[in-house]
Amino acid sequence: MSRRLREWSLAFAMLAPSVVVLVAFVLYPLVRAIWLGRQRCDALANCYRTNGWQQYIDVAQSREFQHALWVTVKFALLTVPAGVALGLGLAVLADRQLRGFRFFRTVFSSTVATSVAVASLMWLFLLQPSRGVLANIDWLNSLFPVLKSPGLLNDPGTALTSVAVSSIWANLGFTFIVVTAGLQSIPRELQESAYVDGAGPWRRFTNVTVPMLSPTLVFVAVVLTSRAFQAYGEIDLLTNGGPVPQDSTTTITYLIYGSSSIAKSDAGLQSSVAVLLFVVLLIVSGLQLRGLGKRVHYGS
Amino acid sequence: MVRLDSITKIFDGVTAVDDVSLEVADHDFMILLGPSGCGKSTLLRIVAGLEMPTSGDVIIGDTRVNDIEPKRRDVAMVFQSYALYPHKTVRANIEFPLKVRKVDKATRAAEAEHAAEALGLTEYLGRKPGQLSGGQRQRVALARAIVRRPAVFCMDEPLSNLDAKLRSETRAELVALHQRLDSTFLYVTHDQVEAMTMGSHVAVMSRGRLEQVGSPSEVYAKPASVFVAQFIGTPPMNILPAGLVEPGDVLVGVRPEHLGVDDASPVRGRVTLVEHLGHETLVHLRVGETPVVVRTQADAAAPVVGAEVGLDVPAMHRHRFDAVSGRRIDT
């Protein structure tokens, strides 16, 4: 066997485990989903008709998909900027090493260890109109009657915002930890230099902290956007995609999996929505990286 | 004028600066010299306002500035790492202190260009710090400091990241800059060559305490303690144990260049190493357990390794130190 052939065989053998995993768990499901998205199936997953690529166009043009896309975009707009700002603000506060900062660091990062199910049940316990904590605080209830009737999760005007708040809370630990790590990598001399030069806290924040954190903030924004577009657990547990008939919280992911979704029993339709979600996410992430990337400073 | 009155700084029970009093006259180039961890950078940071002293007063001009923010102290700081803003251009970096002070755009631009010109940075104004060499970054940090025209410049080992050649060139540039600006410089270093060549005065520190303040030649010629004697000078001053050269509890210090080989001398040592450096020769000996270095002319006959030789310790070049306190005894 020639040396070249031996090297190729060795390279292939070393690559094989990752290639097998990649093909089996990423590539094959993706191709299968794209293929399935061209078909119509029944509740028993028997695919009986193919509509070809036209099915994607039909789904993209459907009122249900467009409504879900709009709800998803609104959900992302509600959760991402607020999540980044809140995580950044808390991380900056905790980074000041004030008295008790270790305790607050633990508290702020604790949500990272809380599952979506637990977080959602907690918020359900807070927001539920009859037995919920908030609905039973009299003065709060008199200020905001919607707490009791119909309840924040049952009012079409407040349901999405309420789910968004629970989602922001659940993601806060992740944002806080990543931003805190980013803050600790900023050289102390940069802040000190600005301080000696006369910059106050706000100017130091805008001229040193934020630019130096920009790669971290873009990363967090992209991850949170991706999570917002894929949010499912909190919607299923808190609102079931409702309140009906407006389907105020039916996001794209809920349209795919939701127990009350019209696509729930058709694997073909579900796949076509999933592939379209993939395309939308790809475009959004690309736009974010291109748009924000211009303002990002990487390294020295 | 900068005056430090009995400054003490304690971090979590560890005393970094211990009762230091120091006066730096206007237009002085004061070097704070000492080994790592001696408290020199902490003292500088206290002057700049980046640390609060645990006790003692910092006076700049006629004002006690302990409770005054750095920006109102009229002090600029140059950091060891230069602390340039990597996302800003050289121009924006230099302009930053003026922008913070709300100086108008045209004045800012003119001042930045003036500072850049003074430090040979004009062609780099549009670049980011990442596109500059270490020496150029260091000059940008200096330009950012001088653009404000502060009364006091605090510099924390600004040359330590440069290579030997650039360091030597920049030393001369800094001295010229000091003369041109006519400001007060407080300069921290652990490098005695920087201290001896740049400073008009040197304050030697050890373990948080001030050992000696004086001109470089004073500190070299009349070290106030064994620590100063051995910290300044390469190779350091030889310290001969009490009773070897003179009677009593007196340590005798002699610079290597003042020692000679004299076979008639009762002070005997064995040669352990001979280093021919081209322009001079260093003869390393052991006198009992004490290592001793003798510096001789390159063309002088050097003893061979292993030979026992006598040491000539001229009385006029002896420095005497108390064997207990290590302080100088003036006779």
Image: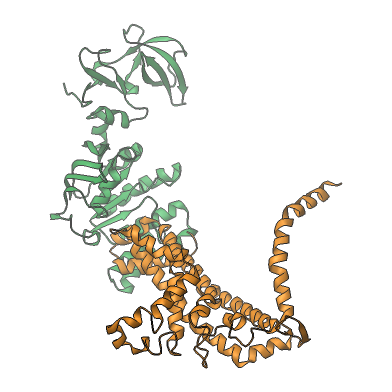
Chain colours: A orange, B green
Q: In the image shown, does A46 or B280 lie closer to the viewer?
A: A46
**What residue is drawn where x is 20% and y is 48%?**
B54
Whether residue B87 is visible here, answered yes or no, is no
| Residue B105 position by quadrant | bottom left
- Could you tell whether A42 is left or right of B254 in the image? right
A93 vs A58: above or below: above
- Could you tell whether B232 is left or right of A18 in the image? left
| Residue B188 position by quadrant | top left
Q: In the image shown, does B39 or B200 lie closer to the viewer?
A: B39
| Residue B221 in the image, given as x and y percentages of width and height | 25, 29
- Could you tell whether B288 is left or right of A30 in the image? left
B1 vs B331: above or below: below
Whether residue B253 is visible here, answered yes or no, is yes
Q: How many marks?
A: 0
Q: In the image shown, does B110 or A53 lie closer to the viewer?
A: A53
| Residue B163 in the image, given as x and y percentages of width and height | 45, 44
| Residue A286 in the image, given as x and y percentages of width and height | 58, 75
B10 vs B231: above or below: below
| Residue B248 in the image, given as x and y percentages of width and height | 20, 14
B139 vs B33: above or below: below
In this view, the residue farthest toward the front is A131
**What residue is drawn where x is 36% and y is 87%?**
A148
In this view, the residue farthest toward the left is B62
Q: In the image shown, does A239 or A9 lie closer to the viewer?
A: A239
